[in-house]
Structures are given as structure tokens and as C-alpha cells.
Amino acid sequence: MDMGPKIVLDEGFDLSQVQTTGSVLHINEICEEIEGTEPGETDNNFVDLIGESVRDFNKLAKKTTTIDSNGFVKKLILEEGGGMPIDEDCTIYVAFSAYWENENEPFDEVDLKDVGILPGLAMALKTMLVGELSLFLFSHEVMYGEMGIPPRIRAAAQCVFYIKLLKSILTPKQGSGAVLYKSMNLPLAANLFNKAVTMLHKCRLADEAEEKIQEKLLKKLYLNLAVCYNKLRVPLKACIACNELNRLNNLWNNSKALFQNAKALRMIGQYGSAEKRLRRAIKLSPQSKDIKAELIVLISTRDACNQTKLTEILGSGRETINEKFKEEIDNLIENFKTNVNLCKLTLPPGLNSDEMNYVREACFRANLFFNKIPRSLALGNNDESTTKSSTESTTSASRTNSEENLDYSFVMDKEEQQSSCDPESLLFGQTE
């Protein structure tokens, strides 16, 4: 029997809005090409999941349980769910189909913008657990009312809903990303900030006033992202957020942004660029104790992982690997591994094949990663004038003596490579 198109919500909705300001449910028909099903095939499980028409509502009512004091909503559990009951602060995702009595086809394409809040549906959902499939028999008093919406919605008519609660996500009452950040739920906070950025970039702006509002919000969001990523120890993403602030002309005139950018650059071993930003930040906020403390951390980190001796060895014209090189690499790796203020360390230019192999083996013994990153990703289409600040760091390889490694940088990393880009590419365009 053809059950007709099934109905799902295109987006989840917040139950707290249902009880207060109201919520609009965006309906979307499910095509037959659902995940795991080839075009033309029928997923029988999904058809059974949604339900079927009911010939006699009076007989059905005898099998149900009333869930409200007025007897307007009756429930029959078809498949048990699990977990905690859903809260008013949850955003939930459901699949459902709805039937009139003795009708084979579900009534579909209902524009709930026309009917507003459905109190019966709100009451029903609050009784469900994730994974649960239930049948609900609704009176018109809590659904579409005496008038209905002719011709699609009958007047003063009972209806049956088959509802599957697919997912429930607890969301904060207010503040969203800021609340999550304060509760130290940093990954979810960063995720919400990113979603907000995406939404702002998709906005169609009417005039210059709206552009200014968008820019103001983006500056705040990118700074929040930089803070989150630094706390999560994902410095490359923090640098990308700071690049966006620079694009919005809100880096070199913002001590907070410079502070976060410097922290991220310090964690990837870009000491010269980090120090430049901290010096600028101190001029903007001379009383800031945090900025001065970060400068002390930067200097101590740079001294602990100093590569001056290694650079001298690589520039000495040697043809084979020597013991001095091995000793210096071993010391550098030990200092890098034990330094909690560093996530990445870019080696100086000039490594030959034997030296590269030794560094790779030494990193493996120390449970570190050794990445060979194409420098073309860093240089890209940027001209020489845009890379001025990226050439400051002595730990970045802008060229190599070995022809084989001319276009690569070599980076020691405490975690797997977080991004396909060279750390130097994160400096492009960040000129004062």
C-alpha cells in the first residue's frame, strides 16, 4: 500500500519557544533517496516507522493513554525510546506523518506558519524519549481549532500523528556561545560561533548601515573564536580567525586581538611575529598584566627552544650527518616535548635527506609527528609585499639548500597536522 510522502521537520525547534514566543516548524518532504537506499528502492522499515491510516478513531482511543487533564491528547507507544526526558531548553528533531480518520493518504504540505503554535504537538513531544515512536490522537481543541484551514485542514476534526523523536540537543536558555564558553564547553561554543559567522556571511544586506552592523558582529565572533581555539590548543585555527579580524581592519588597533594572535603564533613557534604583536598590544594597553605575562612566556619559550646552534650547523657546508647535529636535534626535541607553551616547531632551512630521516626517526621515538608541508600552500598567489611579516621568524623555512626540499617546510608537531596550510600562510596580509 502506498503510504504517500512522509513529513519531517527541516530544522529542529526549541521547546521553550513553543511555550513562550512560539515556534515555526519548517516542513520538508522526504524523497525516496534516503541515506542507505538506492534510487527506486523502497525502505520498508521507514514506511513502517511512519505509520498507517486508522479506520476508526473510537476503537483506537480505547488502546491509548490520556496525557493531559482535559483528555485532548491520547498516546500509544509503538517503540520505546531511552535516555532522559526532554527539557524545555532542548532543540529536538522529529519525523512524523499525520492522518485524518479513515483516510489512506496522510495530509501533507501543511504550512504551520498559517496555524502558528500547535499546543497538542508541544504536549505530545514533552512525553517522548529519544528513539521513541508513538501514535498520538489529537482533539481539534489543541490542534487546528474549530475552523481548520479548508480545504486541506478539516474543521473541528480529530487527527492522528505518528511521531519519531530522532534527536534531542540541550541548548542554553540565553547567551548561546557565551554561556557555553563560561561553562567551559569550548568545542560546542566554537561550533556555535562558527555557525553565527556563516549565517552573517549569507545575509543579504540592504544598505551601508546593515553592513556596519554585520561587520561589528563579525569582529566580536572572530575574536571569540580566537579565544576558544587558543584554549583548545588549536593555534592554526586561532590564526585564521585573527586573519579575518585583520581583513576587517580590527587586528593592529585591537589589543585583545593582538594578544590572542600572539598566543597562537607563539604556540606554532612564530616567535618574531608573536613578539611584534605583543609589543604593539602593550602600546595600546600599557596596563594589561595578561599581555606582559604573555611576553614573558614568549621569551622563555623562545629561549628554551633556541635553534641558533642548529642553524649554524646547517650553514656549515657539511655533506653528511654529524654527531653535533644529532645532539642538537635530540636536545631540541626534548625541550619541545616538555614545553607546554608550544604545539608546533618549524625547523630552519637546509636539511639534507639523511638529516631529515634522523629527525623523523627521533620524532617517532619521542611520540611526536614530523610533517613535510608544501610551501606552495603558504605562498599561493600572495605577492612579495604581502609576506613581509611572515619572513620575520627565524624558525620558518623560506628556502632550502637541498633542491629536493626547496618547496617544503618541516614541522615537529605534538598532534596530527591540524591544517593543510603552512604556519607562515597564517601571517599573510597581517601588516601593520
Image (cartoon, rainbow, N blue to C red):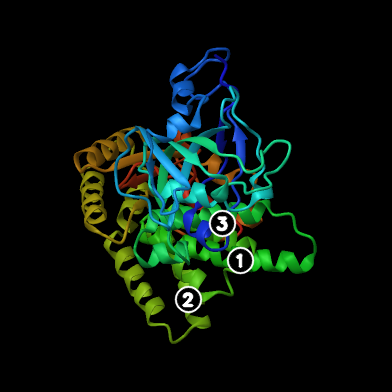
Residue 28 appears at what percent x and percent y?
61, 35
The x, y position of residue 103, in whole percent, is 59, 25
Q: Quadrant of the C terminus?
A: bottom right
Question: Which element is circle 2 on?
Answer: helix
The answer to whether residue 431 shows anywhere in this view is no
Amino acid on which the number 3 mark rests in the picture: Ala
Q: Quadrant location of residue 215?
A: bottom right
Sequence-first tag of 3 and 2: 3
SS under mark 1: helix
Q: What residue sits right under mark 2 in the picture?
A: 279
At label 1, which amino acid type do we have?
Leu
- Give how far apart the Cα atoms at labels 1 and 2 are: 27 Å
Which quadrant: the N terminus? top right
Residue 310, given in percent of the width and then of the height, sits at 31, 52
Q: Amino acid at mark 2?
A: Arg
Q: Earlier in the sequence, mark 1 or mark 3?
A: 3
Q: Is residue 216 left or right of residue 344?
A: right
In this figure, which residue is indicated by the disc labeled 3? 196
Q: Nearer the viewer, residue 219 or 180?
A: 180
Visible in this render: residue 130?
A: yes
Q: Which one is in front in this view, the residue at disc 3 or the one at disc 2?
A: 3
Q: Is residue 44 above or below residue 174?
A: above
Q: Earlier in the sequence, mark 1 or mark 2?
A: 1
393 relative to 151, above or below: below
Mark number for residue 217? 1
The answer to whether mark 1 and mark 3 are in CB contact below 8 A is yes
Residue count near mark 1 (Cα–Cα under 10 Å), binned few <14, some 14–19, many ≥20 = some
Q: Secondary structure at mark 3?
A: helix
- What residue appears at the point 45 percent right and 59 percent down from the top-left corner? 393
Could you tell me which residue is drawn at 43 percent across and 87 percent down? Answer: 287
Label pair 3/2, CB-CB below 8 angstroms:
no
* In front of the other: 139 or 279: 139
